[in-house]
Image (tube, rainbow, N blue to C red):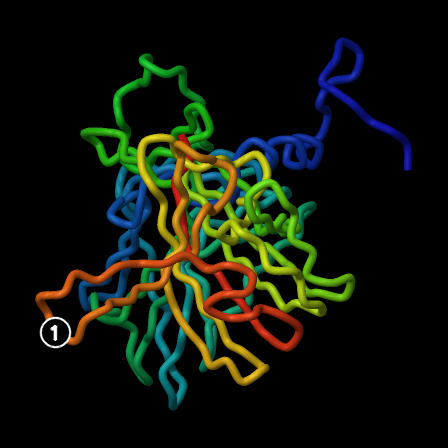
Amino acid sequence: MAEFSGPFDGSPIATQLQWSRMARRWGLDGVHGLDASSTALKVTGSGTTTVSVAAGMAFVNGFYYDNNTPKNLTVPPNAGGAARVDYVILRASMSAKKVTAEYKTGGTSAPTLTQDEAGIWEIPLAQCTVAAGASTVTAANVLDRRWLTDRGVLPSIAGARPPATRGQLLLEDGRLYAGDGATWRWMASQGIDDSTYTPVWSAGNATVNWGSNSKNIGRYQAFGKRVDVTIQLEPSGNPPAYDDPLEVSLPPGLPAAAGHRSLFSWNYSSGNGEGSAVGVAVVFPTESRGRIARLRYSMTSGTNSTVAPNSFSVFTNQPFNIRSGDVLTIDGSYWTD
């Protein structure tokens, strides 16, 4: 097969098929409508022997279609003994050199769409059910089957957004917005896909070694400025007792916000007969924005509600001797600046 490129002087788009293949990259098959409430090329039935296709525009196999006035299509009689399922379609024909709205009969199920890029190419507008022995279609027997297509995502400069077109997507500084006709509403922000890292555990200035065969996995995703993280530790050794509380690093390059303390939940299960516990993990931004600085659990020294509770930090050896056979999990979300 020879190479082709164009259009250039001396190398024009010379055939319908060349045009179709090129133009299909500009616009996908479908009716030009902003959302499902659009009436463009919508088909209606009224209990008569015709159905009506509303005005509207579409792309079909790279060709433009414009119907500027409602078009009625005749419903062929159903002479069979069972209900018949038909389609109203847009048909692009290379031989006829045009796109037209057509009524296509089926059987007990909807007809198959023909899609031959060099011949006939069809897309659906509606599904119509015709009762046995009838030639009419009621409104209730018409199902909307339009494929909708429109403009792609609109790039934007901060402070210079165009008016909010209903159904239009806009991308600005990595944030995606949808227009509702009055304003641009935030939908999503760029982030980091499901990723893993190896958490670094420490106590003061000492790095905690949990054993060469330990399972020490951090898993995270970032959505804009929010980070979801889960850390699971299953030691294979027994590190020494340290004089400082246990700490663990957050995902690399995603420091916690400086303006507030981020909180996580933690769960500890002992395989060495020391029971289990739950608590809260805390980021102290004034101490470090790159790690969870404390794993806290609540206790009280009294037996009534007038005694104020207190919280204590988890160390490598208290209130548990964390070692092989134990499981420590930290889970939660935090914000970055």
Residue reaching furthest left?
Answer: 306
Circle 1 — which element?
loop
The image shows residue 334 at horizontal and vertical percentages of 40, 45
Q: Is 79 rendered above or below residue 63?
A: below
Q: Is 327 rendered above or below residue 216?
A: below
The image shows residue 182 at horizontal and vertical percentages of 18, 29
Q: Return the residue nearer the eye: 214 or 127.
A: 214
Is residue 79 found left or right of 329 in the rendered image? left
Q: What residue type is labelled 1?
A: Asn
Q: Is residue 31 visible?
A: no
**Residue at position x 39%, y 69% from top?**
278
Can you say which quadrant of the picture contains the N terminus?
top right
Residue reaching furthest right?
Answer: 1
- The residue that label 1 is drawn on is 304
Q: Return the residue nearer the eye: 80 or 335.
A: 335
Can you say which quadrant of the picture contains the C terminus?
top left
Is residue 229 found left or right of 210 in the rendered image? left
**Residue at position x 27%, y 53% from top?**
52
The image shows residue 20 at horizontal and vertical percentages of 63, 36
**Residue at position x 18%, y 63% from top?**
46
Category of crowding for the residue at label 1, using alpha-carbon neighbours closer than 10 angstroms: few (below 14), some (14–19), many (at least 20): few
Is residue 212 found left or right of 228 in the rendered image? right
The image shows residue 286 at horizontal and vertical percentages of 39, 32
Q: Can residue 337 be seen in this view?
A: yes
**Residue at position x 53%, y 45% from top?**
250
